[in-house]
Image (tube, helix red, strand yellow):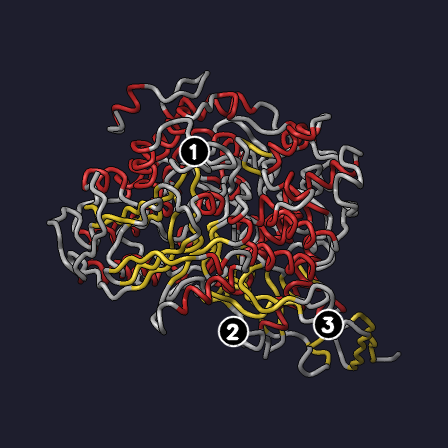
Amino acid sequence: MRLIKHIYPLGGVLFMAIFKGTTGKQLRIFLERKECIIEEVNQDVYEKYIGGIGYGTKILYDELEPGIDPLGPYNKLIFSTSPITLNKVPGGGSIILCYKSPLTNGWGDARCGCNFGPDLKKAGLDHVIIEGRSETPVYICINNGKVSFKPADHLLGKTVSEKTDQIRNDFEGKKVSVMCIGMAGENKVKFASVMSEGRAAGRTGAGAVMGSKNLIGIAVTGTNEIKPADPEKFIEACKRAFKVIKENPTSEGFRQFGTIGDMPDNDETGDFPTKNWQSNSWGKGAALFDYFQTNNFVKAFGCYTGCPVQCGRLAKVDRGKYKTPLHDGAEYETMSVFTAFVLNEDVDAAVHCSFLCNEFGVDTISCGAVIAFAMECYEKGLLKEDDVDGLDLTWGNAEVLPTLIKKIANREGIGNLLADGVKIASKKIGKGSEKFAIHVKGLEGPAHDPRSGKALAITYAVGNRGMCHIQPLESMAYDKGKMDWGMIKFGVEDPKGFEKWEEKGKGKNIKILQDGLKLPDILSTCKFMMYTGLTLDHWADMLSGLTGINIDGRKLLRIGERVTNLQRLFNMREGFTRKDDTLPTRVMNVPLFGKYKDEPDCAIKNLDAMLEEYYEARGWDKKDGIPKETKLKDLGII
Amino acid sequence: MGDNIILCYKFPLTGGFGDARCGGDFDSPSTIHLCLKCRTMETFSMKVYLKPTCVLVEYFGTEIQEIELPSHGNVRELLVEIDLKWGAELPASIWNREKCEFRGPIFLITNKKILNNLETKLDDEQKIEILKVMVGG
């Protein structure tokens, strides 16, 4: 492989692409030598996998050796866009990071809503692939044709905001997008995030991968303009999409209430994991939401320039021991894990925790989950006062939360144990703690409960990155919330025909929904656009107008299926088997308290049967969940 | 009391004590309503049709509900009527009795437009949907 420093011509067209409307270039960085090369993007990969996690999955599957240490030099970190990762596309302000996860040792990806993706394109690049490890801490600046490696010793130990401001100063007033890690990433906390302007590429430990490479930040700016293959068609497709979103009431829902708007109803409907999943409802959701709306919420916020939905919340705490400056945070997941998960009723404390996680660069979900786990260990006497540095980990003790977050980010004391996630922490603690370490494949469960809508049991069990509610699919939105995301056209049954606690018949629908809802991640766009009315056909129209390729919703669905299967192969190669497609027993049982404690029907009765139905729909072996050769050939994977 | 009627209640707008006196002829107590604007009693002269959708049928029923309002009825008045009719049974997850409003992303929609402004005047026989959206994440 050639190892040269390369300065590519600004706006130059180095190849005639089938895919127009892209830069056609990717930057491969070799950190140990502080060198980089520009490569042409592989057109075959583009056609079959497009971009985002599609492109990332293919590259990592081809280039990573199985069994490598995710925190070693041979892991690769990809910053990936797609052709429509553009500010003028609804949801186009986005970037997807792909890597082998240090938290799960399997497939890892994390999406961040921000201007980084579009700005990467303006810098003349579709993807950045980072290899190796720098001997000393560095950050990378990509400025319209020029790549430079800057020493980052002075940034160590600083918060994400401080790092961002200092890196930004290097660009002398230019509009620049920065992604960086916090102390958590520096200390290789296994659920460290990569942050951009208060937004997180949160789950599965991208920040730890970046920290393991001694890469503290990466900044991009540029003036490259993408020229659509068919400008009129592209503009019309975007206009149609914006109109659909504007007219959809869900957009207004997002804007007025943010994701935290679902908190009261989730609590009511048993979709609110409480006290480390001992229950699925608490009875305090409405009060918590009301307090936030009245005392903490300032205004709606879009995470990237041009967002038509503005689901973000600018929030603050004006006074008191949890005084917190105005910041972008307080998502539903974050607020839930720092309230219901740990039985904390102090909303100010939860908002403060959200801010700290952003500043330290920690995934809020995993952080809240591991603290809840620790609280249960403490309650049961598995962790004593000495084990937890004299802290009081009683349920509901709000004061201990900020201290624990800081300890986790810095791997201090008890924080060092918790920084590896619940799976490893429970192995080290032992004494039966594994029973209440709530994770699948090592990824801690988020604030949605399959006992509210059992389709979620399938997606949690089989999720390629673990117990994830959004990647690719919020399944309880299907059988409980009756959403179909425009997928009935592609064979999904009308959700109104399902009861939320039914188990039969959901597997085959989840298969199609997963493939479809994978597309925003493949297109490196915001999935909420599909909640506000965009369908696969809308994405296809924009993609066609931009790139000149002939594509429709059905072809996109097939690409979604292809990526799902390839990620499955990636995980199988890393040693994951059918036995890893499971759920913690606690999550399947009737809740121990709360509204649903006397509702035996909410328990997951036969996960195996649900999974068999799902595997069959996927064309995988019904018993062991291995993709059949016929399916892989059909998808063009082999 | 003669021809006068005094009603005492918890006033939705303030959460405090409310009372209204009225005199005159009335067909039956069921046609007596409190008009918030005038703070007088009058026989309401217009109606709107409320259609609950999706999961809200669980609380409001599947039928279209006829709601009587004063002639100058607006969104605020409609919310008060919703509270009077269903407020006691609606769970706190969707209805805020203190503020007499829906809690979270639940909207009144007419002609594809969300009725965000409480002062928006409603028309006689106007059809209004109640829609709950999911703002997942």
Residue A247: which quarter of the image? bottom left
Res. A50 in view: yes
Viewer-proximal residue among A519 and A148: A148
From this view, report whether residue A475 is shown above or below residue A255. Answer: above
Label 2 sits on residue: B123
Q: Disc 2 and disc 3: Cα gap in Å?
A: 20 Å
Residue A620: which quarter of the image? top left
Same-chain check, marks 3 and 1: no
Residue A151 at what x, y percent from top left? 41, 57
Which tag is nearer the camera, tag 2 or tag 1? Answer: 1
From this view, report whether residue A212 is shown above or below residue A219. Answer: above
Q: Disc 3 and disc 1: Cα gap in Å?
A: 52 Å
Residue A47 at what x, y percent from top left? 21, 40
What is the crowding at mark 2: few (fewer than 14 residues within 10 Å), some, or many (at least 20)?
some
Label 3 sits on residue: B32
What is the crowding at mark 3: few (fewer than 14 residues within 10 Å), some, or many (at least 20)?
some
Letter of the chain that mark 3 sits on in the rendering: B
Letter of the chain that mark 1 sits on in the rendering: A
Label 1 sits on residue: A509
